[in-house]
Amino acid sequence: MSIVPRAGVEDSVDVANAQDELLAAQQQVITAQGTITQYRETLRALIGADAHSMPEIHPVALPALQETLPDSLSFELLARRPDLQALRGYVSASMSQVDAAKAAFYPHFDIKAFWGYNALSVGDLFKSSFQQINILPGLYLPLFDGGRLNATLKSTRTASNILIKQYNQAVLDAVRDVAISSSQLNDLNQQAALQQQKVTAAMVTTRSASAHHQRGLVSYYAAQEARRPAIAQQLLLLDIQAQRLSTDITLIKALGGDYRGPALSENAPLR
């Protein structure tokens, strides 16, 4: 594709600049195609397909994401994570059922309360939550208080204390991951809303320039140049949407599952 001055209206320097930008855009397309090929080969290796049995991959639009997070991200959502449940099992297996019940503390708090914490400790989880009294059937995730266990038994259980420390740290890390990713997603949601307004404003200018060109008031080149800000804003919006999608996936992974829908409300048991 080439850009040729029309009837001497467009300045040759402007056309040369446009030609240079076109070539740069074509280079970006080639780079993107190479990245797609790399992803396809990675996917092929993961599913064990050969070069001839690899399913065809077609481009699809980005999925629509909710514009806001739920009012609360309850701590109980983490109970779906199998790694935390496995560690909980190790702790319980290291002591009797009675001892485990004495050490267990079933907290209830909103993980969003820890947005912006620079340093988060297990003590913060104990202080910022309250003990659930009525435990509904389903999966629940306790914290274990080794100090309370030792005080009750008047002895030190080294193996249990080590497992308790490892388990509580794993829960703390999970809470921190959820707090960070949900805070980032909240910021990106706000950025996306503002960026959408910029796109809308830029499109007004583009449509105005196109209308002026149709009336012969401006050149074709000027009308096309007016599209530049709108395209730039659309690319920025696309980048933010991609970041939102990636962060949303990170949050789902940190929680051990989706966090939307009535089935995951604060009062609904996790089964």
Image: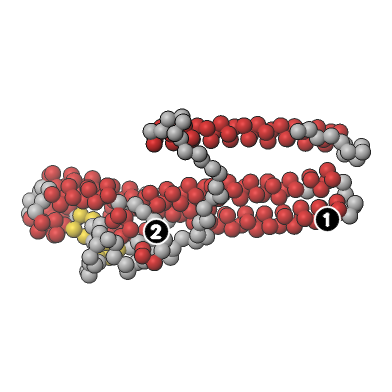
* 98 sits left or right of 110 in the view: left
Query: Residue pushed farthest top?
Result: 51
Which residue is depicted at the point 71% across and 32% down?
A: 23
Mark 1: few/some/many CA within 10 Å (<14, 14-19, 20+): some
**Residue at which label 1 appears:** 211
Query: Residue pushed farthest front?
Result: 52
Foreground mark, 2 or 1? 1
Q: Please state the horizontal and vertical placement of residue 83, each as a whole percent of the image.
A: 27, 47
Mark 2: few/some/many CA within 10 Å (<14, 14-19, 20+): some
On the question of residue 113 being in view, the answer is no
Circle 1: residue type = Ala
- Quarter of the N terminus within the rendering: top right
In the figure, 222 relative to 1: above or below? Answer: below
Q: Which of marks 2 and 1 is nearer the N terminus?
A: 1
Q: Please state the horizontal and vertical placement of residue 133, each as a whole percent of the image.
A: 22, 69
Q: What element carries label 1?
A: helix
Which residue is depicted at the point 23% across and 56% down?
A: 143
* 232 sits left or right of 47 in the view: right
Q: Please state the horizontal and vertical placement of residue 9, each as a whole percent of the image.
A: 91, 40
Query: Residue pushed farthest left?
Result: 154
**Residue at which label 2 appears:** 259
On the question of residue 234 being in view, the answer is yes
Q: Please state the horizontal and vertical placement of residue 211, each as a whole percent of the image.
A: 83, 55
